[in-house]
Amino acid sequence: MLLHLSDLSPEPLHQQVSRQLREKILAGDLQEGDSLPSIRSFARDHRVSVITVQRAYEDLNREGLLVGRQGKGVFVASLDGKGKQMIALDRLREALAPILREARQSGLTEKDIKRLIDEIVRAEEVGS
């Protein structure tokens, strides 16, 4: 499994790892029960520190996306479609909340914001 990690990104490496693994799990590229590489192996293959991978795995474990089994390794957790959707919605909420606060502080109304979001959603549907 190869991820695209960059030292030039403003996003810390452990967050890049977490985000990309989360995307693979939520998209179904990594399935329930799939084994992930050991922390050391992952770190070696991606040329990052063991601590970076450990933090990413811990983040995903807290989110309920990964489970560690003592002496066995790290695996993709069992999630149904609804569980995946809840995690995706929580992540979207976390990302949008500060943006929406800033938009409101800049004088945009709820109607302005909803209209813009509708425009973006429509444009994404056409682009897909």
Image: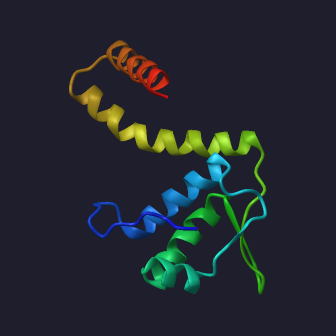
Determine the residue positioned at 37% across, 17% down.
110
Image position, residue 37 (x, y; %):
64, 77
Relative image position of residue 11 (x, y in whole percent): 34, 61
Q: Nearer the viewer, residue 112 or 66?
A: 66
**Relative to 2, residue 115 above or below:** above
Could you tell me how many numbered marks the image carries? 0
Residue 125 in the figure: left or right of residue 65: left
Q: Does 92 sit left or right of 123 as displayed?
A: right
- Determine whether, in the image, residue 128 is placed left or right of residue 67: left
**Which residue is rendered at x = 58% and y = 68% of the image?**
1
Question: Residue 53, how many percent across, how many down?
Answer: 51, 76
Q: Is 41 situated above or below 18?
A: below
Q: Residue at x 39, y 23 (%)?
A: 120
Does 110 appear above or below 42? above
Residue in the image at 65% along x and 39% along y:
85
Nearest the eye: 125 or 53: 125
Quadrant position of residue 52: bottom left
Q: Position of residue 12 (x, y in %)?
A: 36, 66
Residue projecting furthest to the left: 106
